[in-house]
Image (spheres, grey):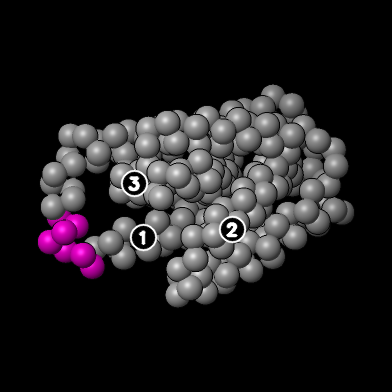
Amino acid sequence: MNNFSQEPGRRVVTDAAGLNSFLTRMYGNMTLAVLVSAFSAYLTMGVFRSAVFGFFSAHPGMVWVILLLPIALSMGVSFSATRNPVGAFVMLMLTAIIYGVEFAIIAGVYSGASIASAFVSSAAVFVTMALYGTITKRDLSKFGAHAMAALIALMIAYLINMFLQSPAIAYIFSFIAVIIFTVLTAWDAQKMKQIYINYGGEVSTNGLAVLGALQLYLDFVNLFISLLQIFGMSDRN
């Protein structure tokens, strides 16, 4: 969803300080988005619980808005990040807020222990793979391409299982999703580092930082949801 290529022939010399500054901004934005989602979920489940659930009970169609709006906002971030970094940052935060509301609704069927286990596990996996993707000299593009193809296939399978309603299949899909987003985390981390090296002098680095934060945030969110489904399997039985 971005216009950057990763052709191996293109190399731009960048100083270490500039790269470290970019990575700090990118991971800082991503961490802020996670914290905003957590705070949004807390407010939804606590302070505004009655109002939120009452609203969705009275307007069930709004559930689709909550599900689809983050997709539209994510596309907006991807297309506007380098042109309007401030607007892209605002859309990233709005995405985080809406996902927080979604988490609160989803978390209603899981125990606190399952939620905590899923969060700690997803954080550990994310930090490990993001660090690996940032420092490794191995080209992960082939692994990333395979993971993206697997993700598309998994999304199709998820749609089919919506009609089959098989908990066993959904459970297996959760493990597959964890593997896919583990690989994508490392790939996205490496990809954004390489995009900065190639294009950092030509476009807004703040915009690139927001774009990278979005991609890594979505990787973390999907890791968390997949692990929550695994840890919380007994909560739903």
Mark 3 lies on residue: 109
Q: Residue at x 44, y 36 (%)?
A: 114
Q: Residue at x 69, y 65 (%)?
A: 149
Mark 1 lies on residue: 67
Judging depth in this view, the residue of 195 and 137 nearest the camera is 137
Residue at disc 3, secondary structure: loop
Marks 2 and 1 close (CB-CB < 8 Å): no
Q: How many marks?
A: 3
Magenta stretch containing residue 72, yes or no?
Answer: no
Q: Is residue 88 left or right of residue 218?
A: left
Residue 113 % position (x, y): 42, 31
Identify the amino acid type marked 3: Val
User: Spatial distance from mark 2 to mark 3, Cα to Cα?
Assistant: 19 Å
Judging depth in this view, the residue of 162 and 151 nearest the camera is 162
Identify the amino acid type marked 1: Leu
Are there few (<14), some (14-19), or many (20+) residues within 10 Å of tag 2? Answer: many
Q: Residue at x 68, y 63 (%)?
A: 150
Q: Quadrant of residue 194?
A: top right
Residue 125 visible? The answer is yes
First in residue order: circle 1 vs circle 3 = 1
Quadrant of the snapshot with the N terminus: bottom right
Region rendered in magenta: 55-61
Residue at disc 1, secondary structure: helix
Are there few (<14), some (14-19), or many (20+) residues within 10 Å of tag 3? Answer: few
Residue 83 % position (x, y): 50, 53
First in residue order: circle 2 vs circle 1 = 1
Question: What label sits on residue 173 in the rendered view?
Answer: 2
Identify the amino acid type marked 2: Phe
